[in-house]
Image (spheres, rainbow, N blue to C red):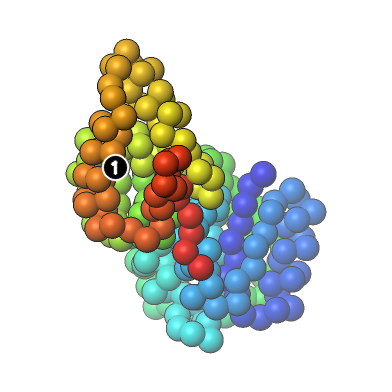
Amino acid sequence: MTEIYYIEDDENIAIAVKEYLSQKGYAVSIFGTLKSGKKALERHIPSIALIDWNMPDGEGAGLCRWIRSKWKELPIIFLTVRDDTHDIISGFKDGADDYVTKPFELEVLYSRIHALLRRSGNLHSQYLSCGSISIDKNRTAVFCGEEEITVSQAEYQLLQILMENKGKTVTRERLLTQIWDSNGNFVNDNTLTVTMKRLREKLSSPSCLKTIRSFGYRMEDIV
């Protein structure tokens, strides 16, 4: 199902948009502050983000720039009362793909979303994230915050498996089988330990990466 994150502090507008888009088959999550929206994005990447400009804890433009620095292809639409030409131009410069001014017709918004998703495809599936760590699977790239980290093939595979199973403990046996044995490279258990140690060091020992003693590893969002 297509997931939409809507960062909007006007409850009436947010509910109306959610109810309408839900009828169209979209799963809409509403966030009343920039902080809560950012936290949700760090845990999971939706299909598209709708952002209001004037929020109680800041301007949506800042969130838009932050999103664009981490996920360059994630579709973003501004929904705002700011209809000045300067604001519209600024919104696009900040990274928005479209700009819709309030008040707006729900049918028009749906058409804009549909058109943008048709052009971009299901891009959210290419991204994995947990805490400050993220992966762009299309580029085979790993990021710690906004910094791209150079990792080996085994380190990348290890991180990807753990992030694809976020919230679940992955056994050492499974990791050894999927990363090494599947390629015909039979190695001992210490190889995994060394690879994990190097990966942790490159990622500055992230708190979201847990060791489950004598069993395996788990990545989980930090509350």
**Residue 58, image x, y percentages:** 45, 83
**Residue 151, image x, y percentages:** 22, 41
- Picture layout, residue 126 above or below residue 80: above
As helix, strand or loop, the secondary structure at mark 1 comes to: helix
Q: Name the residue under label 1.
A: 196
- Picture layout, residue 178 above or below residue 137: above
Q: Can residue 83 be seen in this view?
A: no
At label 1, which amino acid type do we have? Met
- Viewer-closest of 139 and 76: 139
**Residue 164, image x, y percentages:** 48, 41
Q: Which residue is drawn at 72% across and 57% down?
A: 21
**Residue 113, image x, y percentages:** 60, 54
Among the 4 quarters of the image, the one containing residue 13? bottom right
Q: Which residue is drawn at 60% across and 66% down?
A: 6
Q: Which residue occupies the extreme top position in the image?
A: 184
Among the 4 quarters of the image, the one containing residue 107? bottom right
Disc 1 crowd rating (10 Å Cα; few below 14, some 14-19, many 20+) is some
Q: Residue at x 65, y 62 (%)?
A: 29
- Picture layout, residue 219 above or below residue 16: above
Locate residue 82 relative to residue 111 in the image: left or right.
left
- Viewer-closest of 214 and 59: 214
Q: Residue at x 30, y 17 (%)?
A: 186
